[in-house]
Amino acid sequence: MLQWKLKVGLIMLGLVVSAPFARAETTFDGKLTQADGLRSSDSVQFRRLLVDLESYKGKTTALQKQRLKYLQAYEMAVYEDRVDQGIVMARDIFDNTKDADLKYRAGSLVANLAAITRDFKTGLRYLDKSSELRDKVENKAVLHDGIGAAAMFYNEIGQYAIALRHADDMLGDAPSDRSKCAGGLVQIQAKYRLGQLDAPSMSDARSYIDLCTRIREPIPANFLRATLAKKISQSGDPKAAIQLLEPALAEVLATGYPRLIAEVRAVLADIMLKAGDMERAESNALAAVDVVAETRSSESLVYAYRTLYQLSEARQNAASALDHFKKYAAAEKVYLGDVKARELAYEIVRQETEQKNQQIELLERQNEVLQLEQELDKQSALKARLAMVFLMLVLAAVIYWMLQIKRHQRQLQRLAQTDMLTGVGNRHYFTQKSEKALHEAAREGEQAALVMFDLDHFKAINDTYGHGAGDWVLKQVGRICRTHCRKTDYLGRIGGEEFAVMLRGVDLAEAARIAEDCRSTLAQIDTRESGYSFVVTGSFGVTSTGQSGYDLSRLMSHADQMLYRAKHEGRNRVCVYAPDSPEPKSGRRSTPALTVVGR
């Protein structure tokens, strides 16, 4: 499993500097260059050359040994699955070589390997270290190698604007065809994520596909096709998207790279479902699941399970729909958690960099003060006054530094507790605060209630009007919910479009009234500000400690049952849990009892 992750992660790094070599070299430097060019395109010949080069080691210079060690670190990580040892070797080169080009390449390799092991903080730190060497790099291919590696790394951690800036830098510097192929992939993927993939950019994407195909680089070519197909489908032409992507499926399968195969399969499944081809949509979704079902985090897995869930719903197969919805929700939870971890890693390293710069600034100021002290020795008449200035400068700098650290700590705490899109609490924060509130309510004999709701047809909003419109809706929902909550209540976004509110000191009837007010307000949202006109509604489930007790998991289970019942009975309504009512005749889960509050 790790082997294909490494190949996919590093094959693009090899694109920038790799080139096929037709003739065999005889000198050590010639074989080093030949091996470097073959490392991503011909693994067998590459490894043979490393064995041959090892026999020269006693007759080589320190720099030649380090260049060989760099290739051995690459081999160890990519072809022997020993990523940790590869990182150690690359770090050793970075720390000890005096050659700026090699140091730059070693730092980029450490960053890419760290990303593969999910150690994003280390990767970001080495990207920062490598960027400081950029002006010293003489070889343009090596420079493009590092810029391309940084661009791909920032794309991987969700910093698409930074990735796009790096890709544009490389593409604007007359890169080689392979550099242009790699940079074009990053540029198009980043623009897609940022909602900037307009008609001219789509034309650029087709040019990059032609280029990558011409130089026999099927992996970036087909990642580009998948991204372009998603955009075409979202623009309302799923048939054209299928015509672009499906003919390349055989080429995709021939690459043997599961990440590419899974993405293409998942995208085809989603597009074919939109086109009404349910059988082929199901076939591709199942194939995508087979490829990546065991991976820790995969957006393709989320797409595939969502397609299977929607297919089961369309076929009115409740049992299958429930099973696939659970898998879809679980995969999405893992993926979103992984995205959050990458964002947090970026924020931590960014704060570290700011603190480092502040410390440098403080040292510079202290140095200025020391120079003032030396001047005081020459001008004794001013000594007392300058000493006071010195103390005030140091004190002000220390206070400023401490305030900055405190501010950064608060920012990190808020980042860990808050859903950054809607401004409400995230699932972890909501669960933690709700459990504490229930414990206190139980101890004081006070009632509490739980409201859970899910936006109706939210996927249709994303698919029809784009993720920008979907994000706008989520922000409005967060704002509206906050207006209906007191300071003692806890509001959280616990899923993609699912929210929950813990109401302290509120009985079931009052909670139902609050839920109904919230439902009514959601239905009145004026969506024209988003640039489109559509209706926003939500399905609500309500229960209280009087019906479900003070255990949060039981409260959430009963409220979730009511939420699903609201969905089942037509959406845009509030359902209230009532244990003494008759059980429903159908549903995806056992529902003890309920009362429906009017629409």
Image: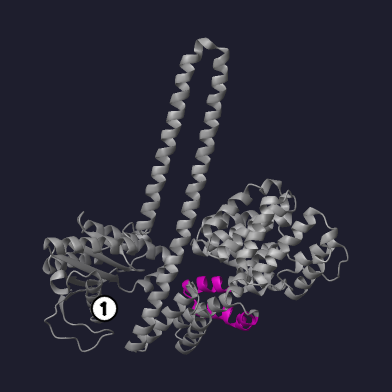
Name the spot of residue 215 as percent of width and height, x first: 72, 71
Q: Is residue 274 visible?
A: yes
What residue span does the magenta drawing correspond to?
A: 225-254
Name the spot of residue 128 as percent of width and height, x first: 58, 50
Seen as rendered, the residue at the extreme front is 58
Judging from the image, what secondary structure is the residue with disc 1 in? helix
Between residues 188 and 543, which one lies in front from this camera angle?
Answer: 543
Please identify the quarter of the rendering in which residue 550 is found.
Answer: bottom left
The image shows residue 497, relative to residue 377, as above or below, that is below
Q: Is residue 252 magenta?
A: yes
Q: Pointer 1: what residue?
A: 564
Magenta stretch: helix, strand or loop mostly: helix
Q: Is residue 403 magenta?
A: no
The image shows residue 477, relative to residue 579, as above or below, that is above
Answer few, some or many: residues within 10 Å of disc 1's Cα (few below 14, many 20 plus, some between 14 and 19): many
Name the spot of residue 6 as percent of width and height, x first: 61, 70
Name the spot of residue 272 as percent of width and height, x first: 48, 82
At horizontal 11% and vertical 81% (from top left) the residue drawn is 580
At horizontal 43% and vertical 30% (from top left) the residue drawn is 396
Seen as rendered, the residue at the extreme top is 381
